[in-house]
Image: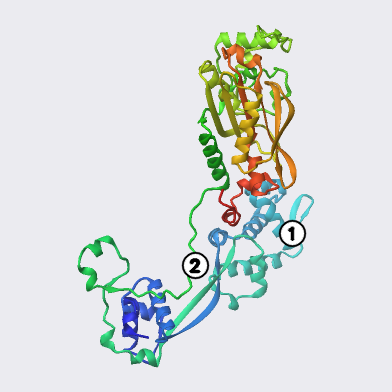
């Protein structure tokens, strides 16, 4: 191996080892001779010299048993069984009731188990041992074992070692490696005057190239034929990548994004959408109602308008739901169960301006967690409000959106939703089967007229997680939120 290809640490180490040709150098001796403090520098230099055939490395590995966190505490304050036995031996009434008042709860249960295995049993409500001397001897042996650590594993009693390995947090085994280095004939043959340390350039920078220093500089050599690991680069989570894909499609289709608050009132979340106040969705099992804020004040003209619609249909020609409407129920605070709650507020603030808006955001429902349900998930929603909007425009828009998502075969079929008429369910063809992905429809007059909206409003929505399961081929929605790096690395780029 050519001395010119050696790094500075390798040159220094080789030059020092040439001073004692037949000596077997330990790590401590190398650090002292080379005036290094970092062991990694010495080990790295020795590795480089060994690869070049200039030095021979000998490695010896041994297992050392040392105290873990709980073991350190036991060494200072005593093993749990030692403290328990001391208490049992000196207490006037060593009963279970007194034990729980003298020891922590997390110690009492395991402690009783340890004492039973030592031959200490409960008799007439108190602890008693058939052979107290044997108990004392065994505890003393265990204490001595703990006090003797750290020690090489092969020098310890095997039974005692197995006992403490079975107890969590008391001891741990660490493998230590010792290295020694011996100069080879090739290393001895390298001329000492060629082992002068030099300043090497390890990185080519623009500042270096702009000057003339690069012409006379010494460059660190690199072996480009050696195997190297493929660097792992950062990438978006599949869910975030899917959100960006959906967002880009909506923007491409001329929509604007709408972002709003999670905390809403039952009035905007349900009453404004003509969902009756005795609807099952109002119950606690479906909605997260809040204690703070428990109530959010709404304008009286809004609750009056919703009340008229719900009770008798107002001026829309509808008969409403009948019964009585509660403004207090409308003002209850909750976590939104859908993003339409924000869309309807946007339309109420801009009742005469044509718009195309969308949102991809979180919603909350009190669902039991299983392979297809989560209490927190994302909803995709799109809205078109303009004069002349009709069902054909809605169907065409849906087909265009899903075609851009990669699902050209789309069909719709009749459905029912409280706030749209007509209502549709959207299905796409995937692997030869029709899968339902969302709902759509035209807002009913009971929704739009109380807010001063006169143009038709086309609306559709779907769950993002369901789409993600389809795109990524998953059968369990929880996989999307498990931090499995290997799974994440293997996901396709969306």
Instruction: Please give the name of the residue rendered at 38% of the width and 77% of the height, measured from the top-left corner.
Output: 45
SS state under label 1: helix
Q: Is residue 85 above or below residue 38?
A: above
Instruction: Please give the name of the residue rendered at 52% of the width and 39% of the height, measured from the top-left corner.
Output: 248
Instruction: Name the quadrant containing residue 143.
Output: bottom right
Instruction: Please give the name of the residue rendered at 64% of the width and 34% of the height, measured from the top-left corner.
Output: 462
Q: Residues within 10 Å of mark 1 (few under 14, many from 20)?
A: some
Which residue is farthest left? 212
Q: Which mark is residue 116?
A: 1
User: How was this image coloured?
Assistant: rainbow
Q: Is residue 82 left or right of residue 249?
A: right
Front disc: 1 or 2: 2
Location of mark 2 (residue): 229
Q: Is residue 373 left or right of residue 175?
A: right
Sequence-wise, which precedes: disc 1 or disc 2? 1
Q: Is residue 377 above or below residue 338?
A: below
Spatial CA span between label 1 and label 2: 54 Å
**Residue 428 spot, x, y in % from top left:** 69, 39
Instruction: Please give the name of the residue rendered at 53% of the width and 34% of the height, measured from the top-left corner.
Output: 253
| Image quarter (top left, top right, bottom left or bottom right) of the N terminus | bottom left
Q: Nearer the viewer, residue 23 or 373?
A: 373
Instruction: Name the quadrant containing residue 185.
Output: bottom left
């Amino acid at each position: 191996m050519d001395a010119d290809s050696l790094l500075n640490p390798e040159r220094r180490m080789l030059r020092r080892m040439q001073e004692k040709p037949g000596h077997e150098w330990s790590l401590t001796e190398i650090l002292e001779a080379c005036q290094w403090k970092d062991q990694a520098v010495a080990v790295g230099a020795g590795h480089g010299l060994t690869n070049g055939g200039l030095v021979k490395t000998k490695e010896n590995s041994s297992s050392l048993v040392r105290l873990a966190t709980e073991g350190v505490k036991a060494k200072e304050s005593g093993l749990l069984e030692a403290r328990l036995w001391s208490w049992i031996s000196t207490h006037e009434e060593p009963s279970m009731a007194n034990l729980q008042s003298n020891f922590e709860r997390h110690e009492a249960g395991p402690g009783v188990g340890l004492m039973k295995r030592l031959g200490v049993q409960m008799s007439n409500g108190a602890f008693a041992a058939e052979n107290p001397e044997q108990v004392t001897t065994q505890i003393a042996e265990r204490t001595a074992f703990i006090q003797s650590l750290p020690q090489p594993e092969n020098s310890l009693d095997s039974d005692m070692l197995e006992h403490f390995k079975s107890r969590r947090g008391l001891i741990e085994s660490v493998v230590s490696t010792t290295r020694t280095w011996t100069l080879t004939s090739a290393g001895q043959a390298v001329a000492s005057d060629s082992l002068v340390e030099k300043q090497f350039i390890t990185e080519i920078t623009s500042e270096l190239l702009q000057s003339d220093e690069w012409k006379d500089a010494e460059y660190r050599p690199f072996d480009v034929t050696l195997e190297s690991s493929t660097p792992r680069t950062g990438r978006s989570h599949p869910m975030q990548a899917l959100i960006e894909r959906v967002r880009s499609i909506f923007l491409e289709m001329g929509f604007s994004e709408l972002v709003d608050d999670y905390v809403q009132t039952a009035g905007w979340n349900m009453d404004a959408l003509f969902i009756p106040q005795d609807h099952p969705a109002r119950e606690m099992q479906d909605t997260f109602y809040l204690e703070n804020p428990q109530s959010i004040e709404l304008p009286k003209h809004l609750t009056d308008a919703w009340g008229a619609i719900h009770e008798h249909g107002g001026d829309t020609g509808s008969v409403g739901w009948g019964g009585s409407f509660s403004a207090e129920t409308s003002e209850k605070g909750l976590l939104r169960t859908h993003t339409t709650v924000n869309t309807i507020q946007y339309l109420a603030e801009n009742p005469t301006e044509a718009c195309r808006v969308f949102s991809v955001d979180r919603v909350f429902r009190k669902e039991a967690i299983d392979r297809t349900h989560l209490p927190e998930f994302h909803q995709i929603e799109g809205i078109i409000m303009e004069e002349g909007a009709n069902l054909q425009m809605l169907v065409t828009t849906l087909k265009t959106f899903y075609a851009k998502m990669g699902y050209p075969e789309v069909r719709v079929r009749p459905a029912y939703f409280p706030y749209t008429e007509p209502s549709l369910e959207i299905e796409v063809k995937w692997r030869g089967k029709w899968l339902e992905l969302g709902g759509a429809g035209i807002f009913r007059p009971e929704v739009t007229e109380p807010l001063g909206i006169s143009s038709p409003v086309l609306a559709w929505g779907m769950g993002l997680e369901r789409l993600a399961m389809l795109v990524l081929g998953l059968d369990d929605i929880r996989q999307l939120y498990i931090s499995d790096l290997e799974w994440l690395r293997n996901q396709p780029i969306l």
